[in-house]
Amino acid sequence: MAKMLIIEDDPAWRSLYLMEFGKQFDVFEANDGLQALAMLDQVEPDIILLDLRLPRMDGLNFLRQMAAKGVRAPVVVCSGALPEGPAPLQDVHMAPKSGDLRDVRSAVRAAVQSAGVASRAGLAPEDTGEPEWLD
């Protein structure tokens, strides 16, 4: 099964993401960028769901530190304050933070397909329809 690291300081949002993606991914949770950096080597996530506004180390600094460590996992930035313009780094997908998770689901789907981990996340690469967990 593919691994997802959720980096979110709000427990309500973490719970929502866990309910949405917990059946398709082994989910690991971090409260901020520093905790997530410490977890990267042990967890080896296939995909990361990242908020930008975090205590101790924000999401953009986490992305920089992750790249400096050579970690290449695709990232879905899910934030109420998305930066203008293109994604800050390669393999970064962006989705607005909203109780309606359609944009997040689409970004996660695109990320797992581009990373080649779709089959471990319950989505065969040749599938063209919505997987069960995206309905």
Image: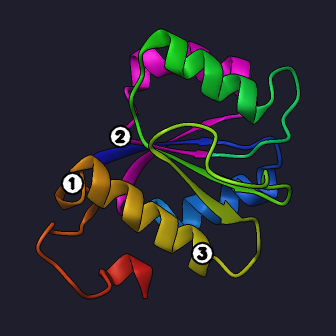
- Disc with the residue nearer the chain's start (1 vs 2): 2
Residue 82 visible, this orientation: yes
Kindly report the distance in space between the C-alpha atoms of the residues bearing marks 1 and 2: 9 Å
Residue that protrudes farthest toward the front in the picture: 85
Q: Position of residue 71 (x, y in %)?
A: 42, 22
Camera-nearest residue between 114 and 27 = 114
On residue 46, the disc is 2
Q: Position of residue 65 (x, y in %)?
A: 61, 16
On residue 103, the disc is 3
Q: Are marks 1 and 3 in contact (CB under 8 Å)?
A: no
Q: How is the image coloured?
A: rainbow
Q: Is residue 40 magenta?
A: yes
Q: Position of residue 70 (x, y in %)?
A: 42, 15
Say above or below: 21 vs 33: below
The residue under label 1 is 120
Kindly report the distance in space between the C-alpha atoms of the residues bearing marks 2 and 3: 19 Å
What's the magenta region? Answer: 24-49
Q: Residue at x 81, y 41 (%)?
A: 9
Residue that protrudes farthest toward the left in the picture: 126
Mark 2 lies on a secondary structure that is loop
Q: Nearer the viewer, mark 2 or mark 3?
A: 3
On residue 107, the disc is none
